[in-house]
Image: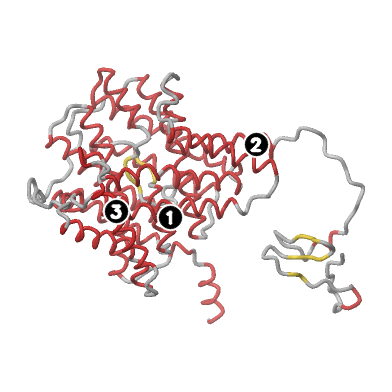
Amino acid sequence: MSAARSKASTSTRPEDERLPAGRTIAYGFQHVLTMYGGIIAPPLVMGGAAGMDTAEMGVLVASCLFIGGLATILQTLGIPFFGAQLPLVQGTSFSGVATMIAILNGGGGMPAVFGAVLAAGAIGIVIAPFFAKLLRFFPPVVTGVVITIIGMSLFPVTADWAMGGAAAGEDHGSLQNIALAAITLVILLALSKSGVPALSRLSILLSIVLGTVVAAFMGLADFSTVLDGDIFAFPTPFAFGLPVFELGAIISMMIVILVTYTETTADMLAVAEVTGSKVDAKRIANGLRADMLSSTVAPVFNTFTQSAFAQNVGLVAITGVKSRFVVAAGGGILVVLGLLPVLGRVVASIPTPVLGGAGIVLFGSVAAAGIRTLAKAKDDNMNMLIIATSLAFGCIPMVKPDFYGQFPTWVGTIFQSSISSATIMAVLLNIIFNELTWRKKEDSGRTVYKHQLAGLQDGDRLIDGKLFDNKGLEIKVIAEEQGEAGDRPMPL
Protein backbone atom coordinates (compact mmCIF):
# COMPACT_ATOMS: atom_id res chain seq x y z
CA MET A 1 0.00 0.00 0.00
CA SER A 2 2.80 2.41 0.94
CA ALA A 3 4.67 1.59 -2.27
CA ALA A 4 1.59 2.40 -4.35
CA ARG A 5 1.11 5.65 -2.48
CA SER A 6 4.78 6.55 -3.00
CA LYS A 7 4.48 5.82 -6.72
CA ALA A 8 1.37 8.02 -6.97
CA SER A 9 3.08 10.91 -5.22
CA THR A 10 6.10 10.80 -7.47
CA SER A 11 3.93 10.74 -10.60
CA THR A 12 1.93 13.82 -9.53
CA ARG A 13 2.58 16.78 -11.79
CA PRO A 14 3.80 20.01 -10.13
CA GLU A 15 0.86 21.94 -11.56
CA ASP A 16 -1.64 19.54 -9.91
CA GLU A 17 -0.79 20.75 -6.40
CA ARG A 18 -3.87 21.67 -4.35
CA LEU A 19 -3.72 24.39 -1.71
CA PRO A 20 -6.21 25.36 1.05
CA ALA A 21 -9.22 27.33 -0.24
CA GLY A 22 -8.19 30.62 1.38
CA ARG A 23 -4.71 30.59 -0.12
CA THR A 24 -6.02 29.42 -3.48
CA ILE A 25 -8.39 32.40 -3.71
CA ALA A 26 -5.75 34.86 -2.45
CA TYR A 27 -3.15 33.68 -4.97
CA GLY A 28 -5.82 33.65 -7.69
CA PHE A 29 -6.72 37.26 -6.91
CA GLN A 30 -3.03 38.09 -7.16
CA HIS A 31 -3.10 36.78 -10.75
CA VAL A 32 -6.11 38.97 -11.53
CA LEU A 33 -4.39 42.09 -10.24
CA THR A 34 -1.31 41.28 -12.28
CA MET A 35 -3.10 41.07 -15.62
CA TYR A 36 -6.11 43.33 -15.08
CA GLY A 37 -4.61 46.36 -16.79
CA GLY A 38 -3.55 44.26 -19.78
CA ILE A 39 -6.87 42.50 -20.23
CA ILE A 40 -9.00 45.66 -20.28
CA ALA A 41 -6.63 47.60 -22.57
CA PRO A 42 -7.76 46.03 -25.92
CA PRO A 43 -11.50 46.69 -25.39
CA LEU A 44 -10.77 50.23 -24.28
CA VAL A 45 -8.66 50.84 -27.41
CA MET A 46 -11.24 49.20 -29.70
CA GLY A 47 -14.10 51.07 -28.06
CA GLY A 48 -12.28 54.36 -28.53
CA ALA A 49 -11.53 53.56 -32.18
CA ALA A 50 -15.21 52.72 -32.77
CA GLY A 51 -16.36 55.97 -31.16
CA MET A 52 -18.31 54.22 -28.40
CA ASP A 53 -19.74 56.01 -25.39
CA THR A 54 -18.93 55.10 -21.78
CA ALA A 55 -21.80 52.63 -21.43
CA GLU A 56 -20.86 50.76 -24.63
CA MET A 57 -17.21 50.60 -23.62
CA GLY A 58 -18.34 49.25 -20.26
CA VAL A 59 -20.06 46.39 -22.11
CA LEU A 60 -16.80 45.60 -23.95
CA VAL A 61 -14.77 45.60 -20.71
CA ALA A 62 -17.26 43.45 -18.79
CA SER A 63 -17.44 41.01 -21.71
CA CYS A 64 -13.66 40.63 -21.94
CA LEU A 65 -13.44 39.89 -18.20
CA PHE A 66 -16.27 37.35 -18.40
CA ILE A 67 -14.86 35.46 -21.41
CA GLY A 68 -11.27 35.77 -20.14
CA GLY A 69 -12.34 34.07 -16.91
CA LEU A 70 -14.11 31.23 -18.74
CA ALA A 71 -11.13 30.81 -21.08
CA THR A 72 -8.76 30.63 -18.10
CA ILE A 73 -10.89 27.94 -16.43
CA LEU A 74 -10.96 25.94 -19.68
CA GLN A 75 -7.19 26.23 -20.15
CA THR A 76 -6.29 25.31 -16.56
CA LEU A 77 -8.84 22.59 -15.75
CA GLY A 78 -9.29 21.29 -19.29
CA ILE A 79 -11.74 18.94 -20.98
CA PRO A 80 -10.91 16.24 -23.56
CA PHE A 81 -8.94 17.82 -26.43
CA PHE A 82 -9.20 21.35 -24.95
CA GLY A 83 -6.93 22.88 -22.31
CA ALA A 84 -3.21 22.43 -21.56
CA GLN A 85 -3.92 22.04 -17.80
CA LEU A 86 -1.13 24.50 -17.01
CA PRO A 87 -1.23 27.58 -14.73
CA LEU A 88 -1.91 29.99 -17.61
CA VAL A 89 -4.19 33.03 -17.40
CA GLN A 90 -6.14 33.72 -20.59
CA GLY A 91 -7.45 37.06 -21.77
CA THR A 92 -8.08 39.35 -24.71
CA SER A 93 -4.97 39.44 -26.90
CA PHE A 94 -3.45 42.81 -27.79
CA SER A 95 -1.64 41.37 -30.83
CA GLY A 96 -4.72 41.67 -33.05
CA VAL A 97 -5.73 45.23 -32.13
CA ALA A 98 -4.03 46.87 -35.12
CA THR A 99 -5.64 44.39 -37.54
CA MET A 100 -9.08 44.78 -35.93
CA ILE A 101 -8.86 48.57 -36.14
CA ALA A 102 -8.01 48.22 -39.85
CA ILE A 103 -11.11 46.01 -40.31
CA LEU A 104 -13.15 48.50 -38.29
CA ASN A 105 -12.03 51.40 -40.47
CA GLY A 106 -12.73 49.35 -43.61
CA GLY A 107 -16.42 50.13 -43.23
CA GLY A 108 -17.70 46.89 -41.71
CA GLY A 109 -17.72 48.22 -38.16
CA MET A 110 -17.76 46.01 -35.08
CA PRO A 111 -19.91 43.29 -36.75
CA ALA A 112 -17.14 42.73 -39.35
CA VAL A 113 -14.52 42.57 -36.58
CA PHE A 114 -16.53 40.03 -34.61
CA GLY A 115 -17.23 38.00 -37.77
CA ALA A 116 -13.52 37.85 -38.63
CA VAL A 117 -12.57 36.79 -35.09
CA LEU A 118 -15.27 34.11 -34.98
CA ALA A 119 -14.36 32.60 -38.37
CA ALA A 120 -10.61 32.73 -37.79
CA GLY A 121 -11.02 31.13 -34.36
CA ALA A 122 -13.06 28.26 -35.81
CA ILE A 123 -10.40 27.64 -38.49
CA GLY A 124 -7.76 27.84 -35.78
CA ILE A 125 -9.33 24.94 -33.87
CA VAL A 126 -8.85 22.72 -36.92
CA ILE A 127 -5.21 23.61 -37.64
CA ALA A 128 -4.00 23.70 -34.00
CA PRO A 129 -2.67 20.09 -33.98
CA PHE A 130 -0.56 20.76 -37.09
CA PHE A 131 1.06 23.80 -35.48
CA ALA A 132 1.73 21.82 -32.28
CA LYS A 133 3.82 19.29 -34.21
CA LEU A 134 6.42 22.04 -34.68
CA LEU A 135 7.45 21.55 -31.04
CA ARG A 136 10.61 19.70 -32.10
CA PHE A 137 11.87 23.01 -33.49
CA PHE A 138 11.84 24.53 -29.98
CA PRO A 139 15.06 23.24 -28.30
CA PRO A 140 16.53 25.20 -25.33
CA VAL A 141 18.30 27.70 -27.60
CA VAL A 142 14.92 28.65 -29.12
CA THR A 143 12.75 28.43 -26.00
CA GLY A 144 15.36 30.40 -24.03
CA VAL A 145 15.25 33.20 -26.60
CA VAL A 146 11.45 33.19 -26.62
CA ILE A 147 11.08 33.26 -22.82
CA THR A 148 13.72 35.98 -22.50
CA ILE A 149 12.06 38.18 -25.11
CA ILE A 150 8.66 37.68 -23.45
CA GLY A 151 10.08 39.27 -20.31
CA MET A 152 11.94 41.99 -22.20
CA SER A 153 8.87 42.86 -24.29
CA LEU A 154 6.98 43.61 -21.08
CA PHE A 155 9.57 46.09 -19.78
CA PRO A 156 8.09 49.04 -21.74
CA VAL A 157 4.67 48.15 -20.30
CA THR A 158 5.82 48.23 -16.69
CA ALA A 159 7.85 51.43 -17.33
CA ASP A 160 4.73 53.11 -18.74
CA TRP A 161 2.72 51.91 -15.74
CA ALA A 162 5.36 53.28 -13.36
CA MET A 163 5.11 56.66 -15.09
CA GLY A 164 1.35 56.71 -14.63
CA GLY A 165 -0.03 55.09 -17.77
CA ALA A 166 -2.01 56.74 -20.52
CA ALA A 167 -4.61 58.09 -18.09
CA ALA A 168 -1.99 60.13 -16.21
CA GLY A 169 -2.17 63.01 -18.70
CA GLU A 170 0.19 65.83 -17.79
CA ASP A 171 1.38 63.91 -14.74
CA HIS A 172 2.79 61.12 -16.92
CA GLY A 173 6.36 60.53 -15.80
CA SER A 174 6.07 62.78 -12.74
CA LEU A 175 8.38 62.17 -9.80
CA GLN A 176 5.30 61.43 -7.69
CA ASN A 177 4.24 58.56 -9.92
CA ILE A 178 7.71 57.09 -10.18
CA ALA A 179 8.21 57.45 -6.42
CA LEU A 180 4.99 55.50 -5.83
CA ALA A 181 6.21 52.75 -8.15
CA ALA A 182 9.55 52.69 -6.32
CA ILE A 183 7.82 52.45 -2.91
CA THR A 184 5.73 49.51 -4.16
CA LEU A 185 8.88 47.82 -5.46
CA VAL A 186 10.66 48.28 -2.12
CA ILE A 187 7.65 46.84 -0.24
CA LEU A 188 7.62 43.83 -2.59
CA LEU A 189 11.34 43.18 -2.10
CA ALA A 190 11.05 43.58 1.68
CA LEU A 191 8.17 41.11 1.86
CA SER A 192 10.08 38.64 -0.32
CA LYS A 193 13.10 38.95 1.99
CA SER A 194 11.02 38.65 5.18
CA GLY A 195 11.74 34.96 5.58
CA VAL A 196 8.05 34.24 6.21
CA PRO A 197 6.87 31.86 3.43
CA ALA A 198 3.27 33.16 3.45
CA LEU A 199 4.40 36.78 3.11
CA SER A 200 6.91 35.87 0.42
CA ARG A 201 4.33 34.03 -1.70
CA LEU A 202 1.78 36.82 -1.32
CA SER A 203 4.37 39.55 -1.81
CA ILE A 204 2.89 40.70 -5.13
CA LEU A 205 -0.67 41.01 -3.81
CA LEU A 206 0.37 42.58 -0.50
CA SER A 207 2.71 45.06 -2.19
CA ILE A 208 -0.12 46.16 -4.50
CA VAL A 209 -2.52 46.57 -1.55
CA LEU A 210 0.03 48.44 0.58
CA GLY A 211 1.15 50.49 -2.43
CA THR A 212 -2.48 51.53 -2.96
CA VAL A 213 -2.72 52.59 0.69
CA VAL A 214 0.41 54.71 0.25
CA ALA A 215 -1.09 56.14 -2.95
CA ALA A 216 -4.22 57.16 -1.02
CA PHE A 217 -2.08 59.14 1.44
CA MET A 218 -0.27 60.74 -1.51
CA GLY A 219 -3.58 61.71 -3.10
CA LEU A 220 -2.99 59.43 -6.11
CA ALA A 221 -5.83 56.94 -5.49
CA ASP A 222 -9.42 57.76 -6.39
CA PHE A 223 -12.26 55.36 -5.53
CA SER A 224 -15.06 57.94 -5.81
CA THR A 225 -16.58 56.42 -8.98
CA VAL A 226 -16.67 52.82 -7.76
CA LEU A 227 -20.44 52.92 -7.06
CA ASP A 228 -21.32 54.64 -10.35
CA GLY A 229 -23.09 52.30 -12.76
CA ASP A 230 -24.66 48.84 -12.52
CA ILE A 231 -23.85 46.52 -9.65
CA PHE A 232 -24.72 43.36 -11.62
CA ALA A 233 -24.85 42.89 -15.41
CA PHE A 234 -24.74 39.75 -17.60
CA PRO A 235 -23.02 40.21 -20.98
CA THR A 236 -25.67 40.39 -23.70
CA PRO A 237 -24.92 38.14 -26.71
CA PHE A 238 -24.37 40.07 -29.94
CA ALA A 239 -24.96 43.41 -28.19
CA PHE A 240 -23.51 45.23 -31.22
CA GLY A 241 -25.35 43.25 -33.87
CA LEU A 242 -24.91 39.92 -35.62
CA PRO A 243 -21.41 39.21 -37.02
CA VAL A 244 -20.63 40.01 -40.65
CA PHE A 245 -18.22 37.72 -42.50
CA GLU A 246 -15.83 39.37 -44.97
CA LEU A 247 -13.18 37.23 -46.70
CA GLY A 248 -10.41 39.86 -46.55
CA ALA A 249 -11.04 40.50 -42.85
CA ILE A 250 -10.99 36.75 -42.09
CA ILE A 251 -7.66 36.30 -43.93
CA SER A 252 -6.18 39.20 -41.96
CA MET A 253 -7.36 37.67 -38.70
CA MET A 254 -5.82 34.32 -39.66
CA ILE A 255 -2.43 36.03 -39.61
CA VAL A 256 -3.26 37.25 -36.11
CA ILE A 257 -4.21 33.66 -35.16
CA LEU A 258 -0.75 32.44 -36.25
CA VAL A 259 0.83 35.18 -34.13
CA THR A 260 -1.38 34.13 -31.22
CA TYR A 261 -0.32 30.50 -31.74
CA THR A 262 3.32 31.54 -31.50
CA GLU A 263 2.83 33.64 -28.37
CA THR A 264 0.67 31.06 -26.57
CA THR A 265 3.09 28.25 -27.44
CA ALA A 266 5.91 30.38 -26.06
CA ASP A 267 3.95 31.04 -22.87
CA MET A 268 3.18 27.32 -22.44
CA LEU A 269 6.86 26.47 -22.83
CA ALA A 270 7.80 29.30 -20.45
CA VAL A 271 5.40 28.25 -17.69
CA ALA A 272 6.44 24.60 -18.15
CA GLU A 273 10.06 25.67 -17.66
CA VAL A 274 9.13 27.57 -14.51
CA THR A 275 7.00 24.80 -12.99
CA GLY A 276 9.08 21.84 -14.16
CA SER A 277 6.09 20.42 -16.05
CA LYS A 278 6.37 18.17 -19.09
CA VAL A 279 4.92 19.56 -22.30
CA ASP A 280 4.58 17.58 -25.52
CA ALA A 281 2.91 18.21 -28.87
CA LYS A 282 -0.40 16.79 -27.65
CA ARG A 283 -0.50 19.14 -24.69
CA ILE A 284 0.45 22.11 -26.86
CA ALA A 285 -2.36 21.19 -29.28
CA ASN A 286 -4.87 20.99 -26.42
CA GLY A 287 -3.77 24.42 -25.21
CA LEU A 288 -4.03 25.97 -28.67
CA ARG A 289 -7.46 24.42 -29.25
CA ALA A 290 -8.63 25.93 -25.95
CA ASP A 291 -7.35 29.32 -27.15
CA MET A 292 -9.22 28.99 -30.42
CA LEU A 293 -12.46 27.70 -28.85
CA SER A 294 -12.43 30.70 -26.50
CA SER A 295 -11.69 33.00 -29.43
CA THR A 296 -14.61 31.51 -31.39
CA VAL A 297 -17.07 32.01 -28.52
CA ALA A 298 -15.68 35.46 -27.59
CA PRO A 299 -17.42 37.44 -30.40
CA VAL A 300 -20.79 36.01 -29.31
CA PHE A 301 -20.24 37.85 -26.03
CA ASN A 302 -18.79 41.01 -27.60
CA THR A 303 -15.07 40.48 -27.18
CA PHE A 304 -12.00 39.43 -29.15
CA THR A 305 -9.20 36.86 -29.68
CA GLN A 306 -8.03 35.10 -26.50
CA SER A 307 -4.45 34.13 -25.64
CA ALA A 308 -2.20 33.39 -22.66
CA PHE A 309 -0.85 36.31 -20.63
CA ALA A 310 2.93 36.41 -20.35
CA GLN A 311 2.97 38.62 -17.25
CA ASN A 312 1.30 35.88 -15.20
CA VAL A 313 4.11 33.49 -16.11
CA GLY A 314 6.33 35.92 -14.21
CA LEU A 315 4.01 35.74 -11.21
CA VAL A 316 4.28 31.93 -11.17
CA ALA A 317 8.07 32.26 -11.32
CA ILE A 318 8.40 34.85 -8.56
CA THR A 319 5.93 33.26 -6.09
CA GLY A 320 6.75 29.62 -6.76
CA VAL A 321 3.01 28.78 -6.66
CA LYS A 322 2.69 26.28 -9.51
CA SER A 323 -0.88 25.07 -8.95
CA ARG A 324 -3.19 25.35 -11.96
CA PHE A 325 -6.12 25.39 -9.53
CA VAL A 326 -4.89 28.73 -8.19
CA VAL A 327 -5.06 30.17 -11.71
CA ALA A 328 -8.48 28.54 -12.22
CA ALA A 329 -9.61 30.42 -9.10
CA GLY A 330 -8.31 33.59 -10.74
CA GLY A 331 -10.44 32.70 -13.77
CA GLY A 332 -13.47 32.38 -11.50
CA ILE A 333 -12.74 35.83 -10.05
CA LEU A 334 -12.57 37.23 -13.60
CA VAL A 335 -16.00 35.75 -14.35
CA VAL A 336 -17.39 37.39 -11.20
CA LEU A 337 -15.78 40.71 -12.18
CA GLY A 338 -17.46 40.37 -15.58
CA LEU A 339 -20.84 39.86 -13.89
CA LEU A 340 -20.27 42.48 -11.17
CA PRO A 341 -18.96 45.64 -12.82
CA VAL A 342 -18.74 47.31 -9.41
CA LEU A 343 -15.92 44.94 -8.40
CA GLY A 344 -14.21 45.58 -11.71
CA ARG A 345 -14.30 49.31 -10.98
CA VAL A 346 -12.62 48.68 -7.62
CA VAL A 347 -9.74 46.82 -9.27
CA ALA A 348 -9.58 49.44 -12.05
CA SER A 349 -9.12 52.15 -9.41
CA ILE A 350 -5.75 50.74 -8.30
CA PRO A 351 -3.19 53.39 -9.32
CA THR A 352 -1.18 52.40 -12.38
CA PRO A 353 2.23 53.29 -10.80
CA VAL A 354 1.54 50.67 -8.11
CA LEU A 355 1.17 48.03 -10.83
CA GLY A 356 4.32 49.38 -12.47
CA GLY A 357 6.39 48.88 -9.32
CA ALA A 358 5.24 45.27 -8.99
CA GLY A 359 5.69 44.68 -12.72
CA ILE A 360 9.43 45.34 -12.55
CA VAL A 361 9.94 42.15 -10.55
CA LEU A 362 7.24 40.18 -12.34
CA PHE A 363 8.44 40.79 -15.86
CA GLY A 364 12.10 40.70 -14.94
CA SER A 365 11.62 37.22 -13.51
CA VAL A 366 10.31 36.01 -16.89
CA ALA A 367 13.46 37.24 -18.63
CA ALA A 368 15.57 35.62 -15.89
CA ALA A 369 13.81 32.28 -16.50
CA GLY A 370 14.69 32.62 -20.19
CA ILE A 371 18.34 33.24 -19.41
CA ARG A 372 18.34 30.14 -17.20
CA THR A 373 16.94 28.13 -20.12
CA LEU A 374 19.59 29.50 -22.48
CA ALA A 375 22.23 28.17 -20.09
CA LYS A 376 21.03 24.66 -21.00
CA ALA A 377 21.78 25.17 -24.70
CA LYS A 378 25.03 23.88 -26.17
CA ASP A 379 27.76 26.48 -25.76
CA ASP A 380 29.04 27.00 -29.28
CA ASN A 381 29.35 29.80 -31.85
CA MET A 382 26.28 28.71 -33.83
CA ASN A 383 23.97 28.94 -30.83
CA MET A 384 25.55 32.23 -29.81
CA LEU A 385 24.77 33.58 -33.26
CA ILE A 386 21.16 32.36 -33.01
CA ILE A 387 20.68 33.97 -29.60
CA ALA A 388 22.29 37.28 -30.54
CA THR A 389 20.42 37.71 -33.83
CA SER A 390 17.04 36.59 -32.49
CA LEU A 391 17.12 38.79 -29.39
CA ALA A 392 18.21 41.81 -31.45
CA PHE A 393 15.50 41.09 -34.03
CA GLY A 394 12.91 40.86 -31.24
CA CYS A 395 14.03 44.16 -29.72
CA ILE A 396 13.49 46.12 -32.95
CA PRO A 397 9.74 46.67 -32.42
CA MET A 398 10.42 47.80 -28.85
CA VAL A 399 13.07 50.39 -29.63
CA LYS A 400 11.64 51.50 -33.01
CA PRO A 401 7.86 50.91 -33.07
CA ASP A 402 7.59 52.47 -36.55
CA PHE A 403 10.26 50.20 -38.09
CA TYR A 404 7.66 48.27 -40.13
CA GLY A 405 5.61 51.33 -40.95
CA GLN A 406 6.35 51.18 -44.70
CA PHE A 407 5.89 47.41 -44.98
CA PRO A 408 2.65 45.71 -46.07
CA THR A 409 0.08 45.46 -43.27
CA TRP A 410 0.47 41.69 -42.91
CA VAL A 411 4.22 42.05 -42.33
CA GLY A 412 3.61 44.58 -39.58
CA THR A 413 0.96 42.36 -38.01
CA ILE A 414 3.45 39.50 -37.66
CA PHE A 415 6.69 41.30 -36.86
CA GLN A 416 5.35 44.22 -34.81
CA SER A 417 5.17 41.71 -31.95
CA SER A 418 8.58 41.34 -30.32
CA ILE A 419 7.67 37.82 -29.26
CA SER A 420 6.68 36.75 -32.78
CA SER A 421 9.74 38.42 -34.33
CA ALA A 422 12.22 36.74 -31.98
CA THR A 423 10.45 33.37 -32.16
CA ILE A 424 10.34 33.26 -35.95
CA MET A 425 14.00 34.28 -36.24
CA ALA A 426 15.13 31.81 -33.56
CA VAL A 427 13.24 28.91 -35.16
CA LEU A 428 14.53 29.71 -38.66
CA LEU A 429 18.14 30.15 -37.56
CA ASN A 430 18.01 26.97 -35.47
CA ILE A 431 16.80 25.05 -38.53
CA ILE A 432 19.53 26.56 -40.72
CA PHE A 433 22.43 26.12 -38.31
CA ASN A 434 21.43 23.09 -36.23
CA GLU A 435 18.94 21.06 -38.24
CA LEU A 436 20.17 21.25 -41.84
CA THR A 437 23.30 19.32 -42.82
CA TRP A 438 25.51 21.27 -45.19
CA ARG A 439 28.07 18.53 -45.78
CA LYS A 440 28.25 14.80 -45.40
CA LYS A 441 29.30 13.77 -41.93
CA GLU A 442 32.57 11.85 -41.92
CA ASP A 443 33.22 8.75 -39.85
CA SER A 444 35.98 9.28 -37.29
CA GLY A 445 37.06 5.65 -37.66
CA ARG A 446 36.80 5.09 -33.89
CA THR A 447 34.44 2.56 -32.30
CA VAL A 448 32.94 2.21 -28.81
CA TYR A 449 31.13 -0.82 -27.43
CA LYS A 450 27.45 -0.26 -26.69
CA HIS A 451 27.80 -1.49 -23.11
CA GLN A 452 30.40 1.21 -22.49
CA LEU A 453 27.70 3.85 -22.93
CA ALA A 454 25.13 2.20 -20.67
CA GLY A 455 26.14 4.13 -17.58
CA LEU A 456 26.20 7.57 -19.24
CA GLN A 457 23.45 10.16 -18.74
CA ASP A 458 22.61 13.43 -20.50
CA GLY A 459 25.18 16.07 -19.65
CA ASP A 460 28.02 13.70 -18.72
CA ARG A 461 31.33 14.84 -20.21
CA LEU A 462 34.99 13.84 -20.31
CA ILE A 463 37.48 16.53 -19.24
CA ASP A 464 41.23 15.91 -19.03
CA GLY A 465 40.71 12.15 -18.73
CA LYS A 466 38.10 12.46 -15.95
CA LEU A 467 34.35 11.90 -16.23
CA PHE A 468 31.91 14.53 -14.82
CA ASP A 469 28.09 14.68 -14.60
CA ASN A 470 25.92 17.64 -15.64
CA LYS A 471 26.39 19.22 -12.18
CA GLY A 472 30.18 19.16 -12.47
CA LEU A 473 30.61 16.33 -9.97
CA GLU A 474 33.24 13.71 -10.81
CA ILE A 475 32.01 10.19 -11.65
CA LYS A 476 34.20 7.42 -10.29
CA VAL A 477 35.58 5.18 -13.05
CA ILE A 478 36.62 1.66 -12.04
CA ALA A 479 38.22 -1.15 -14.01
CA GLU A 480 35.99 -4.01 -15.17
CA GLU A 481 37.74 -6.53 -12.92
CA GLN A 482 36.98 -4.38 -9.83
CA GLY A 483 33.21 -4.46 -10.44
CA GLU A 484 30.79 -7.11 -9.33
CA ALA A 485 29.84 -9.94 -11.67
CA GLY A 486 27.63 -8.66 -14.43
CA ASP A 487 28.64 -5.02 -13.89
CA ARG A 488 29.97 -3.15 -16.87
CA PRO A 489 31.34 0.16 -15.59
CA MET A 490 32.35 2.72 -18.17
CA PRO A 491 36.13 2.54 -18.76
CA LEU A 492 38.00 5.58 -20.04
- Is 53 or 89 nearer to us in this picture? 53
Establish if 416 lies above or below 330: above
Image check: 100 left or right of 374? left
Amino acid type at circle 1 is Gln
* Badge 3: residue crowd in 10 Å (few <14, some 14–19, many ≥20): many
Mark 1 to mark 2 CA distance (whole Å): 29 Å
Image check: 364 left or right of 138? left
**Does the rendering let one see residue 78?**
no
Q: Where does residue 464 sit, x and y in percent of width and height?
A: 83, 62
CB-based contact (under 8 Å), mark 1 and mark 2: no
Image check: 254 left or right of 454? left
Mark 3 to mark 1 CA distance (whole Å): 34 Å
* Badge 1: residue crowd in 10 Å (few <14, some 14–19, many ≥20): many
Query: Is tag 3's residue or tag 2's residue first in the polypeptide sequence?
Result: 3
- Residue ID for mark 3: 181
Q: Where does residue 152 sit, x and y in percent of width and height?
A: 45, 45
Amino acid type at circle 2 is Ile
- Residue ID for mark 2: 431
Foreground label between 3 and 1: 3
| Element under disc 1 | loop
Query: Is tag 3's residue or tag 1's residue first in the polypeptide sequence?
Result: 1
Foreground label between 3 and 2: 3
Residue 85 - label: 1
